[in-house]
Image: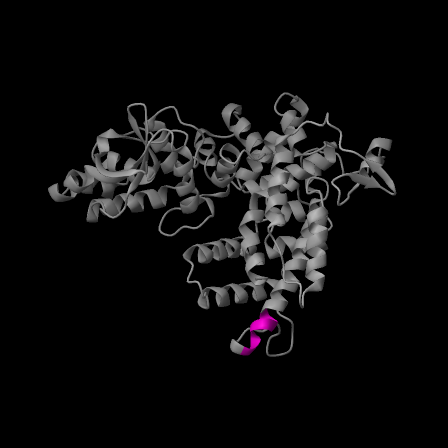
Amino acid sequence: MAATSKALSIKKLSLDLPNYRTVKQKSERGALEALVEINDRPFWALTRSLLTHGYMPTEQIVVQKQSNKYVVKEGNRRVAAMKLILGLLKSPNVSVPTDIVDQISRLNPAIKKSLSSAPCLVFRANQTKEVDQIITRIHGKSLGEGRVRWEAIAIARHDRDVNKNSQPVLDILESFLNSSTECTKNESSAWTGDYPLSVLAEALTGVVRRLRFESLSDLHSKYPSNKKVKNFIDRIIVDVGRKILTFPKIRDKQSEFGALYGLPPITKPTPSPRALQELNVFPSPNGQESSKGSKFSASPSVPVTAASRASNSVASILRNFHPRVTGSEKLVTLSGELKTLNLNKCPHAFCYLLRSMFEISAKLYIERNRKRSQLRTHDEDGKELSLKDKLNQVIKHMVKFNPRDDDMLKKRLYSAQSVINDKFSILSVRSLNELVHNTHFITSADHIRSVLHNVMPLLEEMNR
């Protein structure tokens, strides 16, 4: 049975307390405070719009019936604003702008009536999968389309809680926010939903290397129980949140950011015999692993971890990528090499190959379509365009000449564009260039995994 559409009183709607925008709240009042604290300007802009125009009957609220409650799964900001206007929800910690207070005091009866109920798309308690598919399509790809897009922290939280992928950086941040007294109450509330997670990921990757942990997940397992480690991480989290520690400071070739926090310098450890053996292991076509002529069968005692499950997810994304054979033999070769890499062991090699594939794919796409478009690889002075300029040019062409007129394709392309242009994304063109040229710039498998699904549709479309 599909979802049902019906109008419901705002009084009957309950805000979603474990909203992906924030950590789980204890009450609707806490949910209201968090929604305002995270991003107050859009919230008050929405409230003013509702006060002026009333509720648009074409905008359905997505709700799920849980026990005797109608829990809002999409539309929490709208419902929170309407409850605030109608006096159904308030908090002494929320400072309502004076102009909104004035508008509420002289609210037009017709407007008030339109805000008292809303059209809802109601799902049953056992339709969680269907609900999540809708939420993911609206928010999970970082596409605004009139709604406030999810920040990186919300996307990571959704990826961890729904897709069951490992997000150790988010886990460390939430552990800090739940117990630390290093930041103010307002900062703690705001950082639950809007925090430069990618900056923290890069800083913590540096901590992993300096303290010689195995991975970010290994670092998380020692936090916060290891007091020495906790002291380092707490200071870094606060400075990243306050924009004191930024990408430029972390990547500065002339200084060593770790020294600012008392971290030891990066040293090359002497590898153990076991580590040397692992470095020489390569996957073979029969699924076994070979090491310089020797063969090793996979040990049945190796546990299946969250990281290995996530790695399988990356493998499935790559398995579905099949570039043209004619005219792009090098790309086919690079694709084959990329598929054999273990992302957890070789994140930097993975990025080098991926960047090469984007460069070659963009050139081939432009060459194929040059005659019937204004696509080009060089500017008027004969200087080769940057990869970023080539890709943006290709995306614009794909959207304009989309033969299938596929809206979902356009959304996927725009999602990829937002990643490649975002200088703070690990798979942006800028970051991929930094990986090649900056001696301090490093990345991790977890970070790559969180955004790979956003950029792959562009690579696939360039090679159809």
Q: Where the C terminus falls, by quadrant?
A: bottom right
Image quarter of the N terminus: top left
| Closest to the observer, 281 or 362 | 281
Q: Is the image coloured rainbow, by chain, by secondary structure, or in one colour?
A: one colour
Q: Is residue 177 left or right of residue 202?
A: left
Q: Position of residue 71 (x, y in %)?
A: 32, 31
Q: Answer with left or right where residue 118 lies relative to residue 197.
A: left
Most foreground residue, 228 or 425:
425
From the top left corner, tell me how far across and down residue 196 is, in percent.
53, 42
Q: Residue furthest left?
A: 109
Q: Nearer the viewer, residue 340 or 359?
A: 340
Which residue appears at 58% of the width and 30% of the height? 172
Please determine whether, in this image, residue 149 is positioned above or below residue 92: below
Residue 267 image position (x, y, % from top left): 80, 38
**Relative to residue 392, is residue 139 depicted above or below?**
above
Q: Which residues are magenta?
A: 366-371
Expressed as whole percent of the image width and height from the top left, the position of residue 41 reads 35, 45
Q: Residue at x 35, y 46 (%)?
A: 42
Give the camera-side residue of 200 and 327.
Answer: 327
Predominant SS along the magenta part:
helix
* Residue ID at (41%, 57%): 407
The answer to whether residue 96 is visible is no
The image shows a total of numbered marks equal to 0
Q: Is residue 111 magenta?
A: no
Q: Is residue 411 visible?
A: yes
